[in-house]
Each structure stands twice: as structure tokens, then as C-alpha cells.
Image (cartoon, coloured by chain):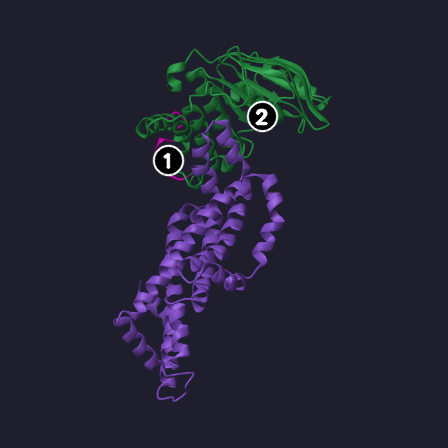
């Protein structure tokens, strides 16, 4: 990447951070500590291993939750998408459950499942399965039906047909669902660690706030944002790789 | 294994009293047809008469309401291994996530054939349609005519003895169309396969076929079966200006347009 391109892409974020850095330098505000102190304490807690431990716990919950949602969402989505009677039977139910804000079930889940990693993973799964499931259903329904007819005409065995045609045909939509799920999982990861948790980024932010260590709380928040940014950048790369045929065959549909 | 080695053995296909209804709408009634081994047979008729329904019934994709289809004396229900289907919409029947070679080899993967073997056959069939050099390309990198060649290669790789084609050249330009018509004729002559072609283009039907089936009526039945007396060597300009070509065309046209 050329230097000009780097400047073109990064001048605004760099400028904003610089403004924050200098404008907040030397402030005595309790709630808005100076950025240099936030960076310093965050670095200190990272170096001591305290924050890294929380980061690890959070990441594990997220990855586990996302993986479980992806399997449930894709498998059920492929089945429901193909099976009209099932689709019509499940539609009202899906629309209802999807309308429940996942954060609303946090208290019940924590009470029911205790404070281990299970309730956190469960909440992420609960929230992330819907976008993947609904997108997979859409992906199957939006497929050119002739592809499936082709599979029938050439007597392609069921498993091979599902893997190489049905799944691949729905893949652009599945990836769109995963992209949403990734963002949702970050939210649920933090929220689930606010309540009934003893580790994780959410726990760190809340504990520091309650100890009136505002610079640390800010640091945890910024780190969460950075984590989300990095994960979505990695996901975008993965998506471009997995869907290169789609992006190149239908240039209008390219994602950002 | 490959179509090349099966020259004289395209099985005869028999259609007896075939009827097809969708709900209360009766589309086809009492169709009898014998497809001779190694012939090109076209099905023509006014648009909406049920040509595609007939082809789908022959392919086994659509269940019959009554009657039977048999291949080599065996009654078939559902898609038969002897039949290779070429769709009109090549965009929808080639997989954009598979390279050309994979698309052609895919039905062989369905047969459980090892990768090296199926790619060897697929490459040979691509060569049969003049597309060996496009093996590593994706379908969407190819022109419409080339994509349709890939579809034909796929049917050949599947070792189809009977090629069923539904308006295969319908969305191609006139020039590409003629080239592909000649390609299918040449493949038929070389491989000895049977070809059943649905088309709305009467000239194309007569130019390519040994016999032309004219469908008409509601529900549709076979109103005529025209033997095309033009021999087995066809040439775009000479054949189409032959008085017997013109005579056959006029006959079919009258039957379709009811004049």
C-alpha cells in the first residue's frame, strides 16, 4: 500500500485521536481522564497480564458462541429454507423470538445458568443464531432453482448436493449473516460479563468503574472497540477469500 | 466409461400414452413417441403449448400423470443415468463457484469416480466441444455460447447416451447459435448419441433434425411427425436453401400457426 493511500485512509482517525490526546492532556475531570493516562494504565494492565487474561476469556466465549450459532443457524437454515411446510410453520415463531432484544434475557439466563462461561456462551448463541439462520433461509430461497434441478437431473447424491450446491449457493447470504452475528456477539459478550461474571472484558470495565478507576474503565472500553474492529477486519478478509467467485462474478454486490 | 467408446449403443426411447396435468389444467394428452437410437429429434410447437413440460417429463424431472417413458426397454421413473440434460439458462445450471473443469466433472463426482479419472474425462469432453483451454476458468469468465458448450460437455462427461436440450441456444446471438447447432450435429455424428431438442425456432429444428415432432392443441398432442429428407450432412447455407428444407419448413409452419 502506498504512503498516499495510507494517508488517505487514516488521516481522519489519526487526527481525531490527536485532538483527543491534546485536548484531554492535563484535565482533572473524573469521568473523562486524559487519554495519555488511559493509554498508560491500559498498557500497564496488559503488560501485567491482567487484561490479557480477561481478553482471552472474552474471546473464547465469543468464538465458542459464534461457532455454535454458525452450525445451528446454517444447518437449520438449509433445512427450513428448502422445506416449505417447515418454513411456513416456523415463520411466526422465528419472527417473535428474533424480536426479543437479547439483552432482555440476560437476567433470566444468569439466574438459570450461574456465573460460569455457559450463560455467556448461551447468550451469544441466542443472539447470533437468528441473523445466521434467517440469512441462510433467504440464501436458499434466493438460489436459482435450476441449480438444484441440475443436481437432480444428474443424480447427484444428497450429501454432495447439499455440500457443493445448496450450501455454496446460500454462502453469500450466510456470510452476510455471519458478519451481523460477529457484531452482535461483541455486544452480548460485553453485556453478559457485566452481570454475574468474575472475568472477561465486560467484568474488567464494570469492576474498574465500581472501584472508581475511570481511566482503566475507559481503557477496557477502547480495547473492546479495538477488538471489534480487528475481528471485523479479519472477517472481511475471510469473506473476500470465501466469496471471491461471487464478488468477481457480480461486481455490483461486492462488500465495501 | 466415456461417451467416445459407446458409439453404436444409444438406447431407443419409447414414450407411450404420456399425459401431464397440473391440477385441473391438462397440458399434454396421449403422447406416443419413439426416439430412434442415434437420431436428432426436435420438438416444436406454438409457445406455451407444453414443449418444455414434455421435455421435463422425458427427463424424469417432472412426474407423469399417466403413461410411461422407457429407455432401452426399461420403464424409467425419475432422472435416468442415460440422459444428459442441457438447460436453456446456462447461468443457472453452471455453478459460479466451480471452475469449468469442476463443473463438467461434477456429475462424475456424483458417481463416486476418483478425482484424477473424472478430471481426465472432463478435460476430454471439454476438448470435444472445443473448450480445453477454458478448463481453469470460471463460467462467468466465459461468453454465453462458451457456457452452453460447457453444459454440453458436462452432459457428455456424464456419459449420456441421450442428450435432452431445452431451447439450448435460445438466448444466444444468431452467429453463435449456428456454430453451436453445427457442433451438436457433429457431436451426434461422432459419438452416436441421440439428441432430443426442444426449440421454438422451426428453421433450427429442421436444419438439425432427422425428424421433427409438431405439438399443438390444448391439451397438446403430436399433430405431425415430419421426416426431414435432407440426409445426414448438413450445411448452414446449402441445407437451408434446399427446396426440401423449404417444403418441410412450410409444412411445420402451417401446422403451428394453423394457417
Q: Residue at x 50, y 44 (%)?
A: A76
Magenta highlight on residue A192: no
Give the residues drawn in magenta, as a range.
Answer: B127-138
Above or below residue B35? Residue B85 is below
Give the percent coordinates (x, y) of residue A236.
40, 56
Give the residue furthest to the left: A47
Local SS, label 2? helix
> In this image, A10 relative to B17: left or right?
left
At 48% from the left and 36% from the top, the residue drawn is B144
Q: Quadrant location of residue B171?
A: top right
Say which chain is green. Answer: B
Q: Is residue A88 visible?
A: yes
- Residue B227 falls in image quadrant: top right
B134 within the magenta span: yes
Give me the residue at 72% from left, 21% from top: B217
Residue A222 can be seen, yes or no: no
Residue sitting nearer the eye, A148 or B141: A148
Q: Secondary structure at mark 1?
A: helix
Question: Is label 2 in contact with label 1 (beta carbons under 8 Å)?
Answer: no
Tint applied to chain A in the drawing: purple
Crowding around mark 1 (Cα neighbors within 10 Å: few <14, some 14 to 19, many 20+) is: some
Q: Residues within 10 Å of mark 2 (few under 14, many from 20)?
A: many
Percent position (x, y) of residue A41?
Answer: 31, 78
Q: Which residue is mark 2?
A: B56
In this view, A10 is above or below B24:
below
Name the residue beneath numbered marker 1: B134
Q: Position of residue A203 (x, y in %)?
A: 40, 69
Q: In the image shown, does A78 or A47 lie closer to the viewer?
A: A47
Image height check: is B85 above or below A252?
A: above
Amino acid at each position: 500500500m502506498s504512503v498516499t493511500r495510507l494517508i488517505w485512509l487514516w488521516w481522519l482517525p489519526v487526527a481525531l485521536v490527536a485532538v483527543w490526546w491534546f485536548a484531554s492532556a492535563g484535565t482533572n475531570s473524573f469521568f473523562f481522564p486524559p487519554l495519555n493516562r488511559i493509554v498508560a494504565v491500559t498498557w500497564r494492565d496488559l503488560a501485567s497480564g491482567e487484561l490479557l487474561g480477561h481478553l482471552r476469556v472474552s474471546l473464547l466465549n465469543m468464538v465458542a458462541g459464534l461457532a455454535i450459532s454458525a452450525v445451528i443457524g446454517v444447518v437449520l437454515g438449509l433445512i427450513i429454507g428448502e422445506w416449505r411446510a417447515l418454513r411456513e410453520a416456523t415463520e411466526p415463531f422465528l419472527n417473535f423470538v428474533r424480536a426479543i432484544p437479547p439483552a432482555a434475557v440476560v437476567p433470566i439466563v444468569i439466574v438459570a445458568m450461574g456465573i460460569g462461561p455457559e450463560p455467556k456462551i448461551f447468550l451469544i448463541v441466542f443472539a447470533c443464531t437468528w441473523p445466521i439462520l434467517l440469512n441462510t433461509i433467504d440464501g436458499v430461497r434466493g438460489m436459482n432453482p435450476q441449480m438444484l434441478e441440475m443436481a437432480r437431473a444428474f443424480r447427484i447424491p444428497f450429501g454432495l448436493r447439499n455440500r457443493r450446491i445448496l450450501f455454496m449457493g446460500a454462502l453469500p447470504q450466510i456470510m452476510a449473516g455471519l458478519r451481523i452475528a460477529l457484531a452482535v456477539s461483541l455486544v452480548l459478550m460485553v453485556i453478559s460479563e457485566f452481570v454475574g461474571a468474575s472475568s472477561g472484558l465486560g467484568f474488567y470495565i464494570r469492576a474498574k468503574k465500581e472501584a472508581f478507576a475511570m481511566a482503566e474503565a475507559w481503557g477496557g472500553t477502547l480495547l473492546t472497540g479495538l477488538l471489534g474492529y480487528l475481528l471485523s477486519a479479519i472477517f472481511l478478509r475471510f469473506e473476500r477469500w470465501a466469496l471471491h467467485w461471487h464478488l468477481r462474478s457480480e461486481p455490483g454486490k461486492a462488500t465495501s | 466409461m466415456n461417451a467416445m467408446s459407446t458409439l453404436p449403443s444409444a438406447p431407443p426411447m419409447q414414450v407411450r400414452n404420456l399425459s401431464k396435468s397440473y391440477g385441473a389444467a391438462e397440458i399434454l394428452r396421449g403422447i406416443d413417441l419413439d426416439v430412434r437410437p442415434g437420431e436428432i429429434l426436435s420438438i416444436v410447437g406454438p409457445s406455451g403449448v407444453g414443449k418444455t413440460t414434455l421435455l421435463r417429463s422425458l427427463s424424469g424431472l417432472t412426474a407423469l400423470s399417466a403413461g410411461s417413458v422407457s429407455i432401452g426397454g426399461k420403464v424409467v421413473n425419475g432422472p435416468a443415468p442415460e440422459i444428459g440434460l442441457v438447460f436453456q439458462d446456462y447461468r443457472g445450471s453452471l455453478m459460479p463457484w466451480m471452475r469449468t473443469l469442476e463443473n463438467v466433472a461434477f456429475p462424475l463426482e456424483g458417481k463416486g469416480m476418483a478425482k484424477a479419472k473424472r478430471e481426465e474425462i472432463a478435460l476430454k469432453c471439454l476438448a470435444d466441444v472445443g473448450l480445453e483451454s477454458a478448463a481453469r476458468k470460471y463460467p462467468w469468465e466465459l461468453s454465453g455460447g462458451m457456457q452452453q458448450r460447457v453444459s454440453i460437455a458436462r452432459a457428455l462427461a456424464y456419459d449420456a447416451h441421450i442428450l435432452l436440450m431445452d431451447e439450448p441456444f435460445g438466448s444466444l446471438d444468431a452467429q453463435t447459435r449456428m456454430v453451436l447447432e453445427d457442433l451438436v450435429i457433429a457431436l451426434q455424428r461422432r459419438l452416436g448419441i441421440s439428441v432430443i431438442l426442444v426449440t421454438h425456432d422451426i428453421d433450427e429444428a429442421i436444419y438439425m433434425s432427422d425428424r421433427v415432432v409438431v405439438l399443438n392443441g390444448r391439451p397438446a398432442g403430436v399433430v405431425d411427425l415430419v421426416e426431414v429428407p435432407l440426409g445426414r450432412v448438413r450445411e448452414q447455407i446449402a441445407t437451408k436453401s434446399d427446396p426440401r428444407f423449404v417444403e418441410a419448413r412450410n409444412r411445420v409452419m402451417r401446422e403451428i400457426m394453423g394457417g
